[in-house]
Amino acid sequence: MDKVSTHFDFDLSVASFGVPLDTYLKTIPMLQGVCVGAFVFDDQGRLLLLQRSKTDSYPRLWEVPGGTIDDEDVSLLHGLVRELEEETGLRARRVTGVVGKGVTFLTREPACVCKYSFIVDIEAGDVKIDPKEHEAFVWVTEDEAKAKNCGEIRLSYTSVGQEKAILESFRSRREQIMHGFPNSTGDLPGKQSLDSSTTAF
């Protein structure tokens, strides 16, 4: 078991996601689950993409870090931060905003799940992927994301929805920069937002 840091802050525009999964699901009865995606940019404005493992579902396709919110997560935002660190080794400093709107889909169970995407500022650090889940990573410009090519790497995305979210994230980030990153920040209820940690299984 690895301990995942959950010391981070967030813009008030994402405060509605600062609640536990069961609390959030009660507000939208049609949902049975929530997935999240973390859109991380470097100082050059490039977006981090991960290539899924050849032994996993959607083999060798490209996506942003993310995954399913667990019942054990303190909040949806904590689950976002956990997934980011588990898949990349990067620690979130601040969740700055939402990318687009939630996308609802049916799983095989079947279950109705909604995926939300967030722009996340990170602390300095190196990307460290888990080879069981991903086999490569790359930082791409907006033009490279649109062209689906980064140098000699062909970018085939996990879904049309993922591609749309990737392109939307560049627009969202430009708007944040244009208007200045919001100064209003919040802390999740209680001390957990400052000092807590969750355990990844």
Image: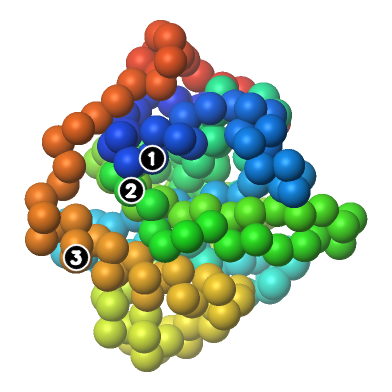
**Which residue appears at 77% of the width and 62% of the height?**
106
Q: Residues within 10 Å of mark 2 (few under 14, many from 20)?
A: many
Query: Reading the chain from its start, which is encountered first: label 2 or label 3?
Result: 2
Disc 1 to disc 2: CB gap under 8 Å: yes
Question: How far apart, in angstroms, are the residues tagged by discs 2 and 3?
Answer: 12 Å
Residue 196, relative to residue 130: is it above or below?
above
Question: Which image quarter holds the N terminus?
Answer: top right
Q: Can you tell which mark lies on residue 97?
A: 2
Q: Is residue 129 left or right of residue 148?
A: right
Spatial CA distance of label 1 from label 2 is: 6 Å
Does residue 192 lie above or below 154 as drawn? above
Task: Name the residue nearer the viewer: 89 or 118.
Answer: 118
Q: Residues within 10 Å of mark 3 (few under 14, many from 20)?
A: few
Please name the residue shown 14% across and 36% down the image: 183
* Disc on the earlier residue, 1 or 2: 1
Left or right: 150 in relation to 114 = left
